[in-house]
Image: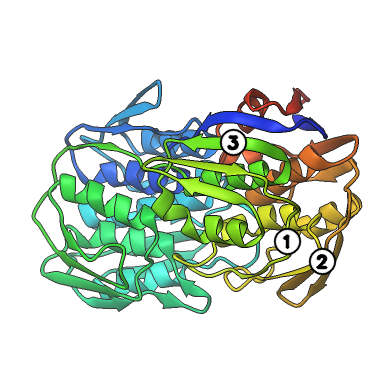
Amino acid sequence: MDKILVHGGPALRGNVRISGSKNSALPILAATLLTKEPCIIHRVPDLSDIHYMLTILSELGCEVERASGTVQIKAETVITDAPYDIVRKMRASVCVLGPLLGREKEATVSLPGGCVIGDRPIDLHLRGFEALGAAVRVQAGNVKVLAPELRGATINMRGKFGSTVLGTDNIMMAAVLAEGTTVIDGAAEEPEVVDLADFLNKMGAKIEGAGTRRIIIEGVKELHGAEHTVIPDRIEAGTFLVAAAICGEEVTLQKVAPAHLVSVTEPLQRAGYFVEANCDTITVRRNGGCLPLELETQPYPGFPTDMQAQMCALLATSQGISVITEHVFPQRFMHLAELKRMGANIELQGATAVINGVDQLSGAPVMASDLRASAALVLAGLTADGVTEINRVYHIDRGYESIDDKLNQLGAKIERVKGSK
């Protein structure tokens, strides 16, 4: 397995271009199953999760062509059974259920895999399918959904820890071809949901209210092909904002959507950093030491759970005591043990991390437990004394396009060491 060596110390400066959103691209690619006509998707990031999704689509019968960030897909005929060997590698593979059910009125998908960050059930997805008229059965590790016809319904997608983004996506994709009107109450408000709705509307769907708690979908008979450009990845952008805060002199992010990043830029400003946002750029530079923060993860537009680990890395060397409470995935703190190996002073109290800032972290061998934890360890290594050796970096390749190359372009010193499979 590959590993990443981060040599701490060099300051970051310059410009970095942010890639298209992974969490938008995955359901948008799945949505191409809803039509027999070709769809063209631009700004698709080069990630292992994207590769897995395109492999799944190929296995389902799609013609897939990919070149320079653009993917063309034609799903003229499809099969409805997604095999375990592929979907086990990525939780987002569950989002093929909605479009297959919408188009073919049946689907069989193995229960998905992905990062180990606690309980991530798909019961809300299945409850939504049942409300649309589908019979649902979970057997031998597979989810089977079958509906002679789909009819519009009112569905509440609010879960124990907030609304489900993939669940909202899945129900939208099934409902666009259902008869009548579907209302999704408690819908996820994330920009990625809006991006999917925009693509579906380009295909001929009739969706209103995406980005609010209530989405209304008028079913149509069929959808057609469309062309779409994926929005910027707000979590990659947030990660680079934190990298700039940790050890940057002045870093400018290009091709971003500043409105999607307010929940990250505002805490950085409270912590004492200079942050300037323009039309599609954000610049960060130091303005003294990092002040402590109190943060709570919440569904969008709150502080994102996908930025919690990175912020822990920043606050590990802040002035004073910081507190981060995780409301979305309360078990998502496996990175804390690795940060403590690097000298961080962190105490976990239930779903709350109490971080007592230290003057300096030290490089050490550490193990990545999930996608965002991987990024946090890279960020911690940027400012640590010595070399940080990060193992299991296949996690980071799931969600960050060439993060080592991009950081090196800003002045970091990062090596990727090839290992055995």
Report the residue at 17% width, 35% height from top: 37
Q: Is residue 352 left or right of residue 366?
A: left
Check disc 2 and report the residue beneath it.
Answer: 320
How crowded pointer 2 is (Cα within 10 Å; few <14, some 14-19, many 20+) is rated as: some
Question: Does residue 33 appear to the left or right of 364 in the view shown?
Answer: left
Q: Quadrant of the N terminus?
A: top right
Q: Nearer the viewer, residue 58 or 184?
A: 184
At horizontal 53% and vertical 54% (from top left) the residue drawn is 112
Q: Position of residue 141 (x, y in %)?
A: 53, 59
Residue matched to label 1: 291
| Residue 351 drawn above or below residue 249 | below
Q: Residue tagged by mark 3? A: 251
Residue 352 visible (yes or no):
yes
Image coordinates for residue 193, horizontal then vertical, percent = 34, 57
Crowding near the residue tagged with mark 3, few <14, some 14–19, many ≥20 C-alpha atoms within 10 Å = many
Residue type pointed to by label 1? Leu
Q: Earlier in the sequence, mark 2 or mark 3?
A: 3
Q: Give how far across and how far down residue 201 sits, in percent.
A: 17, 51
Please tell me whether mark 1 sits on a helix, a strand or a loop. Answer: loop
